[in-house]
Amino acid sequence: MLQASGFSKAVLMPNTHPAIQNKSDIQFFKSKTSGWFTEAVIQASITKDNKGEDFTDILDLNAQGSFVFGDGLNPLSNPDRLSKVLQYLQKFDGILFDHSYEPLLALYGQMHEGLVSTKIGMKGIPSLAEEIAVKKNLDILRYTGGRMHFQTISTKGAVEAIRLAKQEGLGVTCDTSIYHLLFSDEDLQTFDSNFKVNPPFRDHENIVTLIEGLQDGTIDALVSNHQPQDFDAKHTEFDLAQTGMIGLQTFLPAMAKLSDQLGWQLLISKITDGPRRILGEDLSSISSLTIFDPSEEWHYNHKSNISLSSNHPWMNSTLQGKVKFVIKKDKLNKL
C-alpha cells in the first residue's frame, strides 16, 4: 500500500493492537517490515497503551533504534507527563510527536464548530480545542527545551503560535494533512461520514492560513493522515461513525488538485526535504526516486483500490495523477 502511493519511507503511528510500546513489539515490527519496499520509521508509544498515563520504557525502546515517540492519534494532554517526556528525550536527542488538542473541549464533537455546524445542528469541535493545547505545549517546550513535532495542525491560531515559536528559536516543527487543504466543513452538509476526520475539516479562513503556513515555511510537511476504517465503522449514523479517511493511494491526485495553487516544487518539498529535516536526516544524499505522471487519469473504485478499506469520498470517481515507478537503492518497483 505504501509503495503504491509513491512513498519510499513513512512514519508509522503506534496505535496498533497491541500498541508499539516495548522491546518485543519493536523487534516484531522490524521483522514484519524488513521485507517491505517502503522503509518504516516507528513512532514508539510514549505512554502505556497510548493512554497518556504511565510511561513506557523509553530508554529500552531507544536501545532498539526508536527516536520518534508519541501516542499517535491520542494527545499527550497531561502537562506533567509532557514536561517530563520532553526532558527525558533530550538524553538521546529524541523527538516527541503529538496530536495536540484538549480532549474535554472536543468532547462529543462531530465536526468543526462554526456556521455550518450550527446550520445542520451538529455538535462542533471549536478551533480553541487545538489552539489552547498547542500554546500550552509550546510554553512547556519553552520551559523544558527539547524537540517537539505537532501532528496534523488545522487551525489559524495553531499556525500563528508555531510561527512565533520558530522565530523564537524553539525546537518545534509541524505538519498538516493534505486533505485539510482540499475539504472544508461545508462538505459535511451531505452527512457523508467519509468526511468525519480528526482533526475536523475547518472553514475557509483556517484553510487559507494553512496554505500561508506551507508557503512561508511554518508548516514543514504534508501528511496523508491515513486512517483506514472498516465498512461498519463508517456506514452508520454520522454521530456513531468512527473518524478517519484513507489517503495513501489518493495522495498524488490530491497533490495534483493543489498544484496550480501551490506549485509542484513546494508540494514535493513538503513530502521530501521537509519530513527529512523533521527526522534530522542528511539532505545531501538521495536514496530513492519516485516517477509519476501528474496528468494521467484513472478511475478510483473498489477494483482499483488496493487498500482493505474504502473510506474515502473520492471512491467511484475519476482522479488525475498516477505513480509509475519507485526506485530505492538498487530496487525498482513498477506500479
Image (tube, helix red, strand yellow):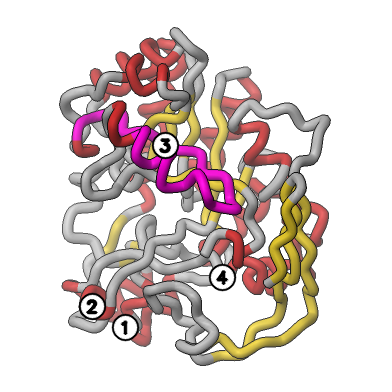
Residue 97 is situated, as x and y percent measured from the top left of the image, at 43, 34
Name which quarter of the figure residue 57 lies in. Answer: top left
Amino acid marked by disc 2: Phe
Q: Quadrant of residue 20?
A: top left
| First along the sequence among labels 1 and 4 | 1
Mark number, residue 191:
1
Question: What's the CA distance linking mark 4 and mark 2?
Answer: 25 Å
Circle 3 packing at 10 Å, graded few (<14), some (14-19), many (20+), is many
* Residue displayed at 79% across by 63% down: 291
Q: Please state which of residues 14 and 119 is positioned toward the viewer in this rendering.
A: 14
Mark 1: which secondary structure? Answer: loop
Q: Residue at x 20, y 31 (%)?
A: 48
Q: Earlier along the polypeptide chain: callout 3 or callout 2?
A: 3
| In this view, the mark in front (1 or 4) | 4
Tell me whether circle 1 and circle 4 mark residues in contact (CB < 8 Å). Answer: no
253 above or below 98? Answer: below
Compute the Cα span from label 1 to label 3.
33 Å
- Judge by depth and name the residue closer to the eye, 8 or 180: 8
* SS at mark 3 in the image: strand
117 in relation to 211, above or below: below
Please name the amino acid that badge 1 sits on: Phe
Q: Is residue 334 left or right of residue 196?
A: right
Could you tell me if the residues under marks 2 and 1 are in contact, i.e. CB atoms within 8 Å?
yes
Q: Which mark is residue 43?
A: 3
Give the CA separation, mark 2 to mark 1: 7 Å
**What residue is pinned by disc 4?**
249
> How many angstroms separate mark 1 from mark 4 (CA)?
24 Å
Instruction: Residue 5: say if magenta.
Output: no
State the CA–CA distance, disc 3 to disc 2: 30 Å
State which region is magenta: 26-48
Q: How many marks?
A: 4
**Is residue 242 something that shows in the picture?**
yes
